[in-house]
Image (cartoon, grey):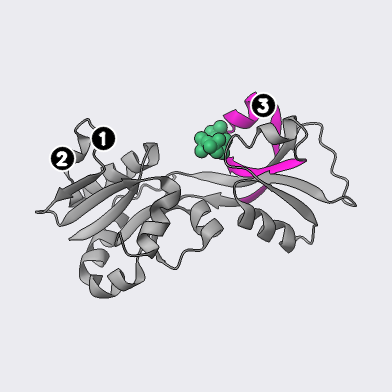
Amino acid sequence: MINIALPKGRLGEKVYDMLERAGYGCPSIKEPGRKLIFENEEAGVRYFWVKPSDVSIYVERGAADIGIAGKDILLEYSPDVYELLDLNIGKCRMAVAAKSDFYDDKQKTLKVATKFVNIAKAHYTSVGRDIDIIKLNGSIEIAPILGLSDVIVDIVETGATLKENNLEVIETIIPISARLISNKASFKFKTGEIEKLTEKMRLQIKTDD
Ligand code: PRP
C-alpha cells in the first residue's frame, strides 16, 4: 500500500485525476462528504487530503510515502524528501510586486511583505540588498497599498489579484509548478511500487506545446 498526501483544493483534484488516469483511481474519493482518508486496496493506494502547505511535512515524517507539493513550499521549507517528478501543473511564478508608482531607492532598506520569508531572504541576499522582512499569512497584496511594505514577494498565477489591487510585477524570482515528492525511507523500502507509480504519472504529464 502506498500512502499518498494530496493537496486539498483545485490542484489536488487535478493531481487526483492524473493518478486516476495512471491507474491509481479510488472511486470513493469523489463521493460528497467531509472524509479525509480514502483507500483502494486493489490499486494499492491510500489517499489523504491535507492542507497544501502541509503535504511536505507528512511526507518528510513518513506519515505519507509520497505526496504532491508546490515548488514554492519545497523552496521555502527545504523538507528532507526526494523530488521525483515535475508534474507541469499548478504553474505560477514567485515574483516581486509593487505599486505601479513605486520608486526603488537602492540606498534604503527595502521593506518586503511575504509568506515566503526564506525565498525572499535568499533572493535579496543573492543580489546584495538589505531588507526588512514583514511576515504575513495571506492577503499580502494589501501591504504595499497601506504602506506596510515597499514590495511583496508572492505567487502570481493569472496576475488578476495584482491587477485588481493596482500592483505590478517588478521582477520574477522563479517559476513554480507541482512536484511529486517521496519520503526517503519509503523510497528505499517501496522502491518498486513508487518507481512504477512515478513512471505511470510521467506518462500523464502534458507538455506546454
Ligand atoms: C495566491 C497568491 C495571490 C494569488 C495569485 O493567494 O498569494 O494572492 O493567489 O493568483 P492570481 O495571480 O491568479 O491572482 P491564495 O489564493 O493562495 O490566498 P492567500 O491570500 O492566502 O495567499
Please say whether residue 152 is one of the residues in the magenta stretch.
yes
User: Considering the numbered disc 3 on the image, is that residue within a helix, a strand or a loop?
Assistant: loop
Question: Which residue is at a point 70% across and 31% down the rendered structure image?
Answer: 167
Q: Quadrant of residue 194?
A: bottom left
Alpha-carbon neighbours of circle 2 within 10 Å: few (<14), some, or many (≥20)? few
User: Considering the numbered disc 2 on the image, is that residue within a helix, a strand or a loop?
Assistant: helix
Mark earlier in primary sequence (1, 3): 1
Question: Which residue is at a point 24% across and 57% down the rendered structure image?
Answer: 3
**In the rendered image, which residue does mark 3 sit on?**
165
| Horizontal and vertical percent position of residue 104 | 84, 44
Of tags 2 and 1, which is closer to the observer? 1
**In the rendered image, which residue does mark 1 sit on?**
34
Relative to the observer, which residue lies in front, 82 or 115? 115
Q: Amino acid at mark 3?
A: Asn
Q: Tell me the magenta residue range.
A: 150-173
Mark earlier in primary sequence (3, 2): 2
Left or right, 49 with respect to 163, comes to left
Q: Residue 27's mark?
A: 2
Q: Amino acid at mark 2?
A: Pro
| Horizontal and vertical percent position of residue 88 | 42, 49
The reply to whether callout 3 and callout 2 are in contact (CB within 8 Å) is: no
Above/below status of 153 relative to 181: above
| Horizontal and vertical percent position of residue 51 | 40, 45
Q: Residue furthest left?
A: 42
